[in-house]
Amino acid sequence: MSGEVVSLLETLARACRVLEMEGHGDMTLGHLSARDPAGRGFWMKRNAIGLGEVCGPQDFVLVDFDTGEVLEGAGGRHSEWPIHAEIFRRRPDVNAVAHTHPSAVCALSALKTDLLPLGVDANYFSHPIPRFDDTAVLIKSPDLGRAMAESLGDHYAVILANHGATFCGNSIEVMTLYGIWLESAARMHLSLAPLLSEARIPAPDQLAERQAQILSAVHIQHSWAFLIRKLESRFAPGKPFYVD
Ligand SMILES: [Zn+2]
């Protein structure tokens, strides 16, 4: 493993742990990946462990785009590898992908409704946030992966009906933040569910202006640094942890 890959996978391991801390864990389900810098495929969390049990580069395997074969690293490969392969193939701007089952997004995914831009967290996304409603089964084939990647289009998150979410970004840090913002926005939507007929949605020009204000490189840097401080204040680096 080159120094560049080690450093990439150390960041990806922190992203797994941050997402577990922030409510994206679902026992051993959920997986994150990053594009291999040498173009050989993508590095994906190994299966059979939870996001909070990911401790470092040893917890990732290098996966081939076409066959799903493990090219490097020890451990099993998650069956939903086509989610990652097909997004990386379709989106050259994307360098990191995640698929998780956070509880509010999962609940919202079971409703026939779009996530509304009610608060600041939803404002990081363009609306409507895409939904992949073709099927509720796991995305285990390249055909389904392609169909899901088509639903994602040029967005950074797609809600998978009765299942969960897939989100991505040009960096591991941005991808992680999109996952956190999506779950927080879904939580707000659900908390207002009985009152949605009275919901106030900001005008499109206000949403666009505020998105430009909040989606800045410096804010992303500050948010990531905050999450790492929070993670390290609660959980020792290099040790598995579990949250309720
Ligand atoms: Zn899933």
Image (cartoon, rainbow, N blue to C red):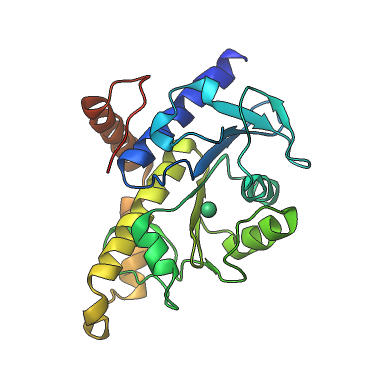
Q: Residue at (38%, 66%) from the top-left corner?
A: 107
| The N terminus: image quadrant | top right
In the rendered image, residue 105, in percent from the top left (x then y), is placed at: 39, 61
Query: Is 116 positioned to the left or the right of 147 in the image?
Result: left
Q: Quadrant of the C terminus?
A: top left
Q: What residue sits 68% from the left and 63% below the top?
A: 147
Who is closer to the viewer here, 149 or 137?
Answer: 137
Q: Work out whether residue 199 can be spotted.
A: no
Picture residue at 64% right of the left edge, 44% below the top: 81
Would residue 153 appear left or right of 229 to someone viewing this image? right
Report the side of 97 relative to 71 (left or right). Answer: left
The residue sitting at the right extreme is 67
* 51 relative to 145, above or below: above
Q: In which image quadrant can residue 187 be found?
A: bottom left
Query: Does 50 sit above or below residue 206?
Result: above
Q: Nearer the viewer, residue 48 or 140?
A: 48
Q: Residue at x 44, y 64 (%)?
A: 126
